[in-house]
Amino acid sequence: MTVFRFVFGFSWCALSALGCSSSSNGSGVAAGGAGSGGGPYSGGAPSGYGGSAGSRAGGTSYGGGVSTGGATSGACRVDSDCSPATCGKCPSGTTVCPTTRCFQGFGTSEPSYCVTDPANCQECTVDADCPAPACMICLDGKTYCNAQRCLNGSCSQGSFVSCPSTSGPTCTSPSDCTAPICRTCPDGSSVCTDAGCTNGWCHAGPASCPQCKADSDCGAAQCSICYDGSTACGSSVCQQGQCATTWPKCPERPTGQPLLWYWTCGFPVCGLDADAGAADAGVSCPQAGTPCTVRGATCADSTASCGAVLVCEDY
C-alpha cells in the first residue's frame, strides 16, 4: 500500500499530482512478476495476455535495525547497521536467506530504517515444472501459444503473443458482423472466437483454449522465506480451465517506531470536489498522527475520499 507520511489533513486529490512516497506493506508485491495463468483471476496477468517477464516473488519487508532479529530498531545509515534476517528452509529442503538493507527515508524528516527483501525459493528445475502453455485462437484463425520457461530456478515468460480485438462497424443484428471463427485447440477441444452485435456496434475477439484440467497443470506455487525465517507460499490452481496464480505474502519486519495513523495517497486523479483528507461522514476515524495498535488496519470510506484512507503503520 502506498503511504503518504503527513499527519495533517488537506486535499489529497490535489496532492496526487505531486506524487507519493511509496512502500510495500507486506502485501507480497511481485518483483518483476510474471503472472502465470489466464482469465480474470487473482494473481497477475494471464499467461498469453500480457503476462510480464520475470518471476513470481514476495514483497519487501520493512523494519528491523541494529538489534537481534530486527525486533526493534534504531536509525540506520548504511546496510551494515542492520541486523541480518533469519534464514529459512524452502519446501524442497534447501536453505535460503533474505537480504537486509538500509532504506533511506524521503526528505530530512523521514527516518532511515532497515528493510528485508524475502528470498525466493526455487520454483522449477526444468520447463515441465512451469504452467502449461496458454493458447488462443486469434481472429486470423491461427492458434498461438505462450509458454513459460524455467530460467535460474524461476518460471518466466520472456516474450508473448497477444491477439487483438476489433470493434465496428455499426450493426443492427449479428448477421451484419463478421462470423465467429471456430478451431480445434491443442488439447482437442473446439472453441470459437467472440463475435456479435452489441448496442449497435460489431465486436470480435480471440478465444482462449483450455490451459489446464487440474492444479498440477499449473506448476508449483511460488514460496519465499520471510525476514523472520518463516515460509510464505502463494498458490497456483486451475480455475475454469485457466491457471490462476497468487504470490507469497510475507509479514512486515517491524521498524521499532511507534504505530501511528497515516493517510494514504489516494487515486492519482479524482473528480470529487470534497476534501479527501477528512474522515467521511458516518465513519468514525481517529486523527492522523495519533497512536494505533493493529498494524495494517485502515479506516475511512475510500470511495468518498478520493481513494485515501487512514492506515496504521510504523513508517
Image: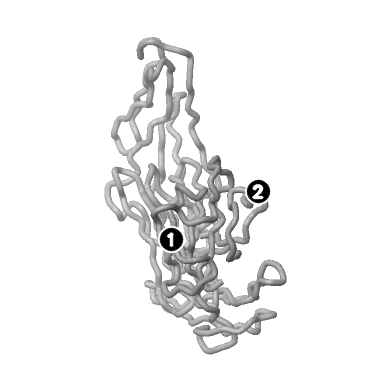
The numbered mark at residue 17 is 2
Residue situated furthest front in the rendering: 281
Side of 180 where 314 appears, left or right: right
308 over 152 or under it: above or below: above
- Dividing the picture into quadrants, the one containing residue 219 is bottom left
313 over 272 or under it: above or below: below
Mark positioned earlier in the residue sequence (1 or 2): 2
Quadrant (top left, top right, bottom left, bottom right) of the C terminus: bottom right
- Using a 10 Å C-alpha cutoff, classify the residue at mark 2 as few (fewer than 14 neighbours), some (14 to 19) or many (20 or more): few
Closest to the observer, 15 or 63:
15
Which amino acid, mark 1? Cys
68 over 238 or under it: above or below: below
Residue 144 in percent (x, y) is at: 45, 35
Side of 157 where 104 appears, left or right: right
Residue at which label 1 appears? 299
Q: Is residue 97 visible?
A: no
